[in-house]
Image (cartoon, grey):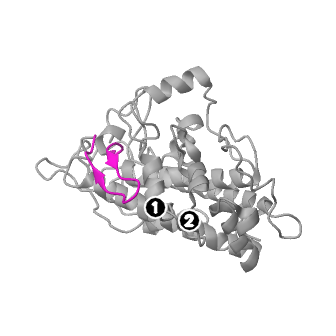
């Protein structure tokens, strides 16, 4: 059963099976993207940054009312000038953590397919649980942006220099809150690229592992409710799949990441318009646009849910003030 009551998990989240050190990290980033892109090279176009900006940026010159992020604060969530930002950070230190990208939840309803529906749903549950923990870490850290009297903490809210998001090292309170939220967003956005939830299959070819059925959904996936606990299995469509992803071998008989991903293309960071898809599945119909639209819509839902969770956790007044701290560039002045 899914529990939608407020909850905070304060335990540290493991970063995956291995720690990726700098030389390996550079090599991994130079390989083809395993997710919506983070950098503007190697065939990527900063897709995570652009999706996040299209979803959460305040209009130019408009002060945040808590529903959008002002420029400097948005830089920390989305990244800027080649930085990963919180939303891109899983591509630096969780590259091979499949749950961080909603990979390996593959299934095809054909005799002999090597994964069952139950096995695929188990992998999807691991992803959702991972993202829920990241979301909770953000809510927990956000409380430290206020002092013991409920006023804005100048040190905790400071953005005099960019936040650093790497290997779970704690920093300023606002940075830690943004990190939890951004890491959760990464997996949510990846889901729409890495799955067949929103896309269509190529009707000119037979359904197969390299052409799984598309579900054509236009709404955010209900099981990506990060305020819940766990996954409601009944909400998972029978034909839902993501792609198997590995740097070694083991996916040859399964739906591979390359068969279903819609990772790369051009995205207008102001409007979210998606053009020039760069992958085979993305070029089928308007699949790249569908993936981007889904990621933008769910990014907005996640921030709305994050604000609600702040209020449930800290009370109405404090929760609104914390949301103000996270979205305003001068919170000491603007969130008093």
Q: Nearer the viewer, residue 87 or 335?
A: 335
**Residue bounds of the magenta highlight:** 261-278
The residue that mark 2 highlights is 303
Q: Position of residue 229 (x, y in %)?
A: 61, 65
Taking the image as shown, residue 66 lies to the left or right of residue 234, namely: right
Query: Quadrant location of the C terminus?
Result: bottom right
Q: Residue at x 59, y 35 (%)?
A: 93
Look at the image and say whether residue 270 sits in the magenta stretch: yes
Taking the image as shown, residue 230 lies to the left or right of residue 322, namely: left
Q: Is disc 1 surrounded by few (<14), some (14 to 19) or many (20+) residues within 10 Å?
A: many
CB atoms of marks 1 and 2 within 8 Å: yes
The residue that mark 1 highlights is 55
Q: Is residue 50 above or below residue 69?
A: above
Question: Outermost residue, front direction?
Answer: 61
Q: Position of residue 56 (x, y in %)?
A: 50, 62
Taking the image as shown, residue 147 lies to the left or right of residue 103, namely: right
Look at the image and say whether residue 43 sits in the magenta stretch: no
**Magenta span dominant secondary structure:** loop
Q: Nearer the viewer, residue 64 or 188?
A: 64
Q: Position of residue 320 (x, y in %)?
A: 69, 74
Q: Position of residue 332 (x, y in %)?
A: 76, 63
Q: Nearer the viewer, residue 141 or 259?
A: 141
Q: Residue at x 29, y 56 (%)?
A: 289
Q: Residue at x 57, y 63 (%)?
A: 226
In whole angstroms, how far apart are the C-alphas of marks 1 and 2? 9 Å
Q: Is residue 288 above or below residue 56?
A: above
């Amino acid at each position: 059963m899914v529990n939608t009551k407020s909850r905070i998990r304060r335990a540290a989240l493991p970063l995956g099976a291995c720690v990726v050190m700098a030389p390996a990290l550079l090599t991994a980033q130079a390989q083809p993207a395993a997710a919506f892109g983070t950098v503007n090279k190697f065939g990527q176009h900063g897709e995570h940054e652009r999706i996040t900006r299209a979803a959460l940026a305040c209009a130019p010159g408009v002060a945040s009312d808590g529903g959008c992020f002002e420029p400097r604060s948005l830089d920390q969530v989305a990244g800027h000038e080649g930085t990963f930002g919180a939303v891109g950070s899983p591509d630096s230190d969780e590259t091979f953590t499949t749950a961080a990208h909603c990979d390996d939840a593959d299934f095809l309803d054909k005799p002999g397919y090597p994964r069952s529906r139950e096995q695929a749903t188990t992998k999807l549950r691991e992803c959702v649980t991972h993202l829920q923990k990241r979301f909770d870490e953000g809510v927990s850290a956000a409380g430290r942006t206020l002092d013991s009297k409920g006023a804005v903490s100048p040190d905790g809210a400071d953005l005099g220099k960019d936040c650093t998001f790497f290997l779970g090292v704690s920093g300023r309170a606002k940075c830690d809150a943004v990190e939890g939220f951004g890491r959760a967003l990464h997996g949510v956005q990846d889901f729409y690229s890495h799955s067949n939830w929103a896309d269509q299959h190529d009707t000119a070819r037979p359904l197969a592992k390299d052409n799984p059925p598309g579900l054509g959904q236009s709404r955010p996936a209900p099981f990506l409710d990060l305020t819940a606990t766990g996954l409601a299995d009944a909400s998972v469509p029978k034909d839902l799949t993501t792609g198997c992803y590995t740097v070694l071998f083991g996916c040859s008989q399964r739906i591979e990441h390359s068969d279903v991903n819609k990772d790369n293309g051009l995205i207008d960071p102001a409007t979210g318009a998606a053009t020039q898809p760069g992958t085979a599945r993305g070029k089928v119909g308007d699949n790249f646009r569908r993936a981007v639209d889904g990621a933008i819509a769910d990014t907005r839902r996640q921030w709305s849910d994050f604000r609600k969770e702040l209020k449930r956790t800290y009370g109405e007044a404090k929760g609104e003030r914390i949301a103000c701290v996270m979205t305003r560039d001068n919170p000491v002045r603007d969130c008093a």
